[in-house]
Amino acid sequence: MKISDIMTRGVQTVTPDQSIHEAAALMARIDCGALLVNDQDRLIGVVTDRDITIRAVAEGLPGDTPVSEVMSQGVRYCFEDEEVQHVAKNMADIQVRRLPVMNRDKRLVGVVSLGNIAASDSNRASATVLHGVAKAH
């Protein structure tokens, strides 16, 4: 089974020049704690509620601070044509709960989460990723 069979499509993103206020408002509206940062259809980072809290609010930065100033770069990802078991092992090894999904042109096409893998028909993949993520916490 391929990641494209189980991933979530239509992922909400922000651009690096959007404000942290806009990012936080979008997080509140869609009830999530992390947004991918996309620049002209290229994934360049991720901004989390923790990034906004620690890197902006705690430092006294204003709400109009660009996302690019507080986001994390070097985002790990997987490809849509990879096997679910392979990605589950990778997620377990790097102890993450979700990964952006790219096509082979490195364009963002979705996101795969622990929930997507758990809901798949692969008990082996579910056990792999759950075991790896559980080690981190």
Image (cartoon, helix red, strand yellow):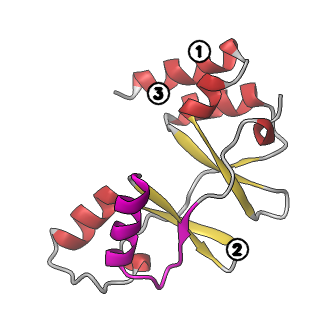
Q: Is residue 137 left or right of residue 104?
A: left
Position of residue 67 measured from the top left corner of the image (x, y, whole percent): 41, 76
| Residue 26 versus residue 86 in the image, above or below | below
Position of residue 109 measured from the top left corner of the image (x, y, whole percent): 73, 57
SS type, badge 3: helix
- Residue indicated by mark 1: 127
Query: Does the stretch in magenta take in 25?
Result: yes
Q: Amino acid at mark 3?
A: Val
Q: Mark 2, residues whose alpha carbon is within 10 Å: few (<14), some, or many (≥20)?
A: few
Q: Amino acid at mark 1?
A: Ala
**Residue depicted at 64% across the width and 28% down the height:** 117
**Mark 3 and mark 1: span between their CA atoms?**
10 Å
Position of residue 135 measured from the top left corner of the image (x, y, whole percent): 41, 22
Query: Does the stretch in magenta take in 38?
Result: no
N-term-proximal mark, 3 vs 2 = 2
Residue 48 visible in the displayed image: no
SS type, badge 1: helix
Q: Mark 3, residues whose alpha carbon is within 10 Å: few (<14), some, or many (≥20)?
A: some
**Residue depicted at 85% across the width and 57% down the height:** 104
- Residue indicated by mark 2: 41
N-term-proximal mark, 3 vs 1 = 1
- Residue indicated by mark 3: 133
**Of the numbered discs in the image, which one, if any, rests on residue 62?**
none
N-term-proximal mark, 1 vs 2 = 2
The segment highlighted magenta reads 12-31
Q: Is residue 119 left or right of residue 69?
A: right
**Mark 3 and mark 2: span between their CA atoms?**
29 Å
Q: Quadrant of the C terminus?
A: top left
